[in-house]
Image (cartoon, rainbow, N blue to C red):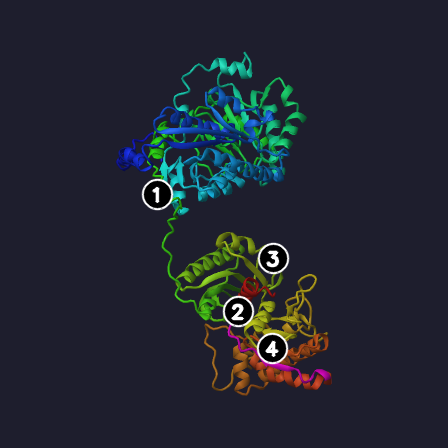
Amino acid sequence: YEWHRPLVKPQELYFKKLSSKKKQVMEKNGNNRKLRVCVATCNRADYSKLAPIMFGIKTEPAFFELDVVVLGSHLIDDYGNTYRMIEQDDFDINTRLHTIVRGEDEAAMVESVGLALVKLPDVLNRLKPDIMIVHGDRFDALALATSAALMNIRILHIEGGEVSGTIDDSIRHAITKLAHYHVCCTRSAEQHLISMCEDHDRILLAGCPSYDKLLSAKNKDYMSIIRMWLGDDVKCKDYIVALQHPVTTDIKHSIKMFELTLDALISFNKRTLVLFPNIDAGSKEMVRVMRKKGIEHHPNFRAVKHVPFDQFIQLVAHAGCMIGNSSCGVREVGAFGTPVINLGTRQIGRETGENVLHVRDADTQDKILQALHLQFGKQYPCSKIYGDGNAVPRILKFLKSIDLQEPLQKKFCFPPVKENISQDIDHILETLSALAVDLGGTNLRVAIVSMKGEIVKKYTQFNPKTYEERISLILQMCVEAAAEAVKLNCRILGVGISTGGRVNPQEGVVLHSTKLIQEWNSVDLRTPLSDTLHLPVWVDNDGNCAAMAERKFGQGKGQENFVTLITGTGIGGGIIHQHELIHGSSFCAAELGHLVVSLDGPDCSCGSHGCIEAYASGMALQREAKKLHDEDLLLVEGMSVPKDEAVGALHLIQAAKLGNVKAQSILRTAGTALGLGVVNILHTMNPSLVILSGVLASHYIHIVRDVIRQQALSSVQDVDVVVSDLVDPALLGAASMVLDYTTRRIH
């Protein structure tokens, strides 16, 4: 929205309506009584915005009575005793309040707010204003707004709805919530206020009051002002204005950034006017940096505490460049098309014209120096984003329209809220859900899982072979599932990921994967998913996830100590000890598939020999099935394998069921190997329960029990060995991480 465009007809009608209401409103206010307006100013910056309004109020004594309260850094010598410029403008200062507690740190800011809150009630009781005008986002302004709101004084807030950065945003929006009326500068700010549930009828889109001066200022005599502040030998467009303030949410970094800025300006070798920073926490350290580098005595620099606003306008209007992080740089300077370098995050959310070059991470001298070379001496088109020069007349009309007979209690315009379908606890719990991801050797599966372990919806795709394709597909499937969850009335609490290999669950990183999942080592899964979905993410090994699924939804529920063994493409597992999952010192616990049960057994994918996985996994059975098939020893009567179908473990199992002796022998050997592994687990962990999970579990259960009876110590022979009744333990385990962490915090 550009202010130089003609006002739209509805806005003209709006101001006409305000004007026509003026007389009747004043009559309501009580026998044509003047509106008593208190303008409170805290520093040089807010006075530049408030002064045009104060002049406007002063020109209409029939309607307004003006009281001026001065506080904050206006009254401090280190910041130029700027209250004097208010006196020079011929305003009577009704009250001076010393409210600044020196220290220039976070605690001093808090104490200053507290001191202002202690002193302001007496002043407001004495003045009894009808309305108080508060500007901006300073901590002093928060004290003013808080005092006025608690004392039932109407508040008009200037420049609400804008977005900048740091703590200023929080303060500005807090004042918005306290204020009864709002004057904003841009269309976006107006929309923000409406989004914040402020009453549209009490919001005025007026533009910035300072623009009423700015747009007519550049034609005045300026060379004498430039020479007075920068020296007789300085030419127009051949100097720099620098104004940088501390960032209160990251003081240490902002001081370092200021140091880099000064180094860059010294290297750039142009005459520079440096203004001292404001009184925010960290300003004292910034001044120390200036003195350490000798800025106050450097021939190229002029360091000053304050420049009167009329003169400051001329200085920035004819500068070769302005650098720093002041709101003036991104707002007022745009009226002249002066090039600006905006450093850091202090104004990161501001609307800006094309004259502003942002250096968000001003972390090196070279980066700032490069920005100076790019910007210095350019001339940009004038920007009217923040005003058209007619803000004050609009604000005065708005003030005249205020009806003091209306109830003081402000109303918020909340959007309609969809009624809750049910307050039944079961319904609420069912809608709490997790997004579960199972990253298998063949398939990639994503599911929406409810609190009760119900898989509401499941998505399956082939697992891509390359890292880039796999990450892209995971993100795509999760985004689609999260969108579908909204339609299914499921509130997603987070994302849980089950994957093969060794995982660091604390960091959400796959350290080493199985050979089944290629290009999957040192992979950070948490960051891309969390950044994309804006949800917390948990990652763990698939065996551990199976154990967690049993603990929450399966046969391990309520068991203090149990072990889960997964029999699938590979062999994995998880150990629950005293209700907690065991990860081990290097996240390698429960690699149960690689327990060695024979010194001269077959090769394993891990590089060893005789592991359980080399005997009993789906891969091992597939290997043996292919050998039999190649020797024409697999198929028996009533059995066939289509030509386009690969021979696998299920064919071996089918052959064994149909009486194939060799197939039966292979399965018995595999089951025995698994049983010996379970015996080792019983002797090591002494669990009360062993749960066999996966597609092969039901084929192994009887052999495993036989091996335990034959090989285990008598003290552990009575342990329960059961087959899991969970359909998707990997998905349910991934979901259980989310549901436990976010609801019960027990894991």
Question: Horizontally, is 722 left or right of 384 in the view?
Answer: right
Report the quarter where the N terminus lies.
top left
- Reading the image, the residue beneath label 2 is 732
Q: Mark 3 or mark 2: which comes first in sequence?
A: 3
Residue type of the residue flagged with mark 2: Leu
Give me the C-alpha separation between circle 4 and circle 2.
15 Å
Report crowding for label 1: few under 14, some 14 to 19, many 20 or more residues within 10 A (C-alpha): few
User: What is the quadrant of residue 556 in the picture?
Assistant: bottom right
In the image, residue 114 lies at what x, y percent? Answer: 57, 40
Which residue is at the far top? 232
Mark 3 vs mark 1: give the one in front.
1
How far is disc 3 from disc 2 in space, using C-alphas? Answer: 24 Å
Which of the two discs, 3 and 4, sits closer to the camera?
4
Q: Secondary structure at mark 4?
A: strand
Disc 3 from disc 1: Cα separation: 67 Å
Q: Which mark is residue 521?
A: 3
Question: Is label 1 in contact with label 2 (beta carbons under 8 Å)?
Answer: no
Check the picture and name the quadrant holding the C terminus. Answer: bottom right
